[in-house]
Image: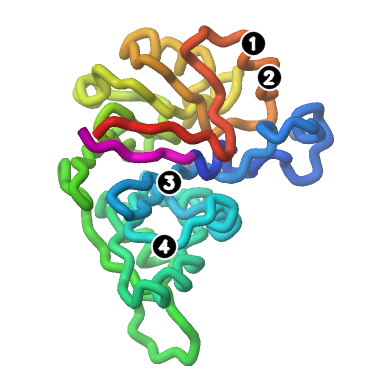
Amino acid sequence: MSSLQLTVLGSGTSMGVPTLGCHCAVCESGDKRDKRTRPSVLLAYAGRNVVIDTTPDFRFQALRARMDRLDAVLYTHSHADHILGLDDIRPFNLKLNRAVPVYGASETLAILRKQFSYIFDGEPVESTLPQVEMHAIDGPFELFGAKIVPVPALHGPQPVLGFRFGAAAYLTDFLRVPDASKALLEGLDDFVLDALRYRPHPMHSNVEQSLALVAELKPKRAWFTHICHDLGHAETNAKLPENVRLAYDGLQFEVQL
Ligand SMILES: [Zn+2]
Ligand SMILES: [Zn+2]
Ligand SMILES: [Zn+2]
């Protein structure tokens, strides 16, 4: 059976932790696991690197993870903390001498075309542009021999996609998961999911809501991500059930495909 290596490139919420201008105990913490860049994961398999989202920290994350190539990007949705690193794929275009395939819901691709109009407007430029090949997701698809299953959810009123690959799934930026999507999340070994903070939020699942979803779906292990500075790593972990942990930048595990 083949497998992939999942690396959490970033486990933080949109503002990152430490948060600019904040001096709370978590932002000032000396624990490396309290340093959270914006949310993204790397899937490495079959000699390829696939990232889910390109955050404003993408360049730093790729350097830190010693990523030497980029073969595809899967987008969850078009919020700034998930897309703004797109321009930084250029060195990988040059190194591999090809466009990077980009997968997302058609609404997400439309916003990428707008936010990064300079990539798509066909105007002549003297500088390097990111080269992308856009693929609208309309159901499960195969990517370098792995089956990628999109998992639609709701981020407040906005649709968002999670992704299942083999025995793991990544679902960030959601508040509600429709029943049809819950069926796609059965029998997981590892479930990486949004849990912003303890207090409720109009667009994000909180610790209590994510624990309820974990209890319902029963993955072997769950990892909370998109975490804000309300949750200190060690003190929060001490209160969570044994099979639920906060993700942290650099967390790695193997996933059966
Ligand atoms: Zn986000
Ligand atoms: Zn803080
Ligand atoms: Zn979002």
The C terminus sits in image quarter: top left
Between disc 2 and disc 4, the foreground one is 4
At label 4, which amino acid type do we have? Answer: Arg
Q: Label 2 crowding class (10 Å Cα cut-off): few <14, some 14-19, many 20+?
A: few
Which residue is nearer to you in this view: 42 or 171? 42
Tell which circle, 4 or 3, labels the residue nearer the N-terminal end. 3
* Whether residue 70 can be seen here: yes
Among the 4 quarters of the image, the one containing residue 106: bottom left
Which residue is nearer to you in this view: 111 or 227? 227
Disc marking residue 69: 4
Residue at horizontal 16%, vertical 41%?
140
Residue at horizontal 68%, vertical 38%?
35
At label 3, which amino acid type do we have? Answer: Leu
Between disc 4 and disc 3, the foreground one is 4
Residue at horizontal 53%, vertical 19%?
245
Q: Which residue is mark 1?
A: 238
Disc marking residue 234: 2
Q: Which residue is mark 3?
A: 42
Q: Measure the C-alpha gap from mark 4 to mark 3.
A: 11 Å
Q: Is residue 82 left or right of residue 144?
A: right
* Cβ atoms at labels 1 and 2 below 8 Å apart: yes
Part of the protein shown in magenta: 1-7
